[in-house]
Structures are given as C-alpha cells and as structure tokens.
Amino acid sequence: MLQTASVLPEAIYDELRSLIVDQTYAPGTSITESAVALRFGVARPTAKMAIERLVTEGLLRRELHQSARVPQLDAADIVDLFDNRAVIECAAVAALPAVPVDAMTAHRALLASSGSFAQNDIAFHRALVAGQPSPRLARMHALLMGEIELCIGQVQAAHLLTAAEIGAQHQGILDAITAGDPTEAARLTREHIAGSRDRLLSNQRNHHG
C-alpha cells in the first residue's frame, strides 16, 4: 500500500508534465487539485503532491489562495530564460570530457521521432548539463528547466522548428564535443539556443503585436 502511494504522485506528475509541455494544457490553463484527482481517480492530497512538484519546477505557478496555472511567459521572460540558459549550457558543454550516454540516447530518439521532439530535446539538454562535473551548475540549470520546457513545448506546438532541424543542430554540438573543441561546442550551443529564442519571440509578436 505504501509503495502504491509513493508511485501514484510520480505517475501523475509525469502525465501532467507531458500534457503541459505538449500544450494540451495551454498557457493560462487552471490545474485544480479536484480536477486532477477526478482525472486520475486519486485522493486530493495525492493530486496536490504532483501539482506542488510542478509548481516547484516552474511548470505551474500558484498565486496565494488560487489554483495553479500554466504560466504565460511574455517576451521579457523568454529573453531572460534563454539568455541565462545559454550561459549555463555553454559552460556545461565546454566542460564535458566526452558525450554523455544519455545525451546520445535522447539524440537518437529525436532523430527517430515522427514530428514530436519536445521531450527528447529536453532530455538531450538535461543530459549534457548533467554530464559535466559541477553539481552546482546542474542545479542552476534545473531551476530554469521547467520554464524552458514550456518554451520548447511552444516551439513544437507552433511548428517553429522541425525535429530534423533540431537534430542537425544537436549533431553539430555532439561533433564538436567529440572532436575535443570546447569553444566550438559552446558557440554552436549558443547559436542553437538563440535560434529557438528568436523564433519564439517572432511567433509571439505575430500573435500579439
């Protein structure tokens, strides 16, 4: 019974995270404990555990005395997120002694995908940062990744990049790491992140400007 109780919030968290990243729950959507409990057939405290974890990671926001909502990121949020992400990820790839196994696994899965790339793209970048030697750098990256995942989901939903385009950019980064060229790996990482940022900003201007 204890094991079941510990597994359920994790499964709910994983499902909710996927629904948020793929834009099934669009920015601004309210995610209540009662709705999650009803959807998954669990008690409200179990639903609350999953929601609170998503709030902690930045995939949901909760104002005082209000239900959690999927964040709506404006242009300033996107610039701030992607610029700080670039600082961390460029430092990470420059410090990598070799390509992490998990990064290659995510890269191959992305190349084999039939259009949906967000989850594998996220896994690829997480693996690159996790593979470098500094746990503090990995913790800083984790603080940003919830909101970054929201952005990657929006890139996918709006068809701003294809899996093939992202895969080609990832391959360049991997080749530079394999060649032992940290400067080139960092440069390509910066370009890759800036490209996603700029397409996201352009799409937002087209819809709101």
Image: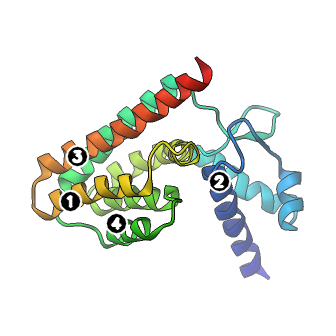
Q: Residue furthest top?
A: 209
**In the structure shown, which secondary structural element does the residue marked by tag 3 occupy?**
helix
Neighbours of disc 2 within 10 Å: few (<14), some (14-19), many (20+): some
Rendering coords of residue 51 (x, y %):
72, 52
Residue corresponding to mark 1 = 96
Residue corresponding to mark 4 = 103
Identify which amino acid the numbered label 2 is placed on. Arg
Residue drawn at x 67%, y 61% as measured from the top left = 13
Residue corresponding to mark 3 = 188
Identify which amino acid the numbered label 3 is placed on. Leu
For marks 4 and 3 on the same chain, the one whose residue lies earlier in the sequence = 4
Q: Residue furthest left?
A: 180
Q: Picture quarter containing residue 105?
A: bottom left
Q: Picture quarter containing residue 102?
A: bottom left
Residue drawn at x 31%, y 73% as measured from the top left = 101
For marks 2 and 1 on the same chain, the one whose residue lies earlier in the sequence = 2
Neighbours of disc 1 within 10 Å: few (<14), some (14-19), many (20+): many
**Mark-to-mark CA distance, 4 and 3:** 16 Å
Neighbours of disc 4 within 10 Å: few (<14), some (14-19), many (20+): many
Identify which amino acid the numbered label 4 is placed on. Ala
Residue corresponding to mark 2 = 53
**Mark-to-mark CA distance, 4 and 2:** 24 Å
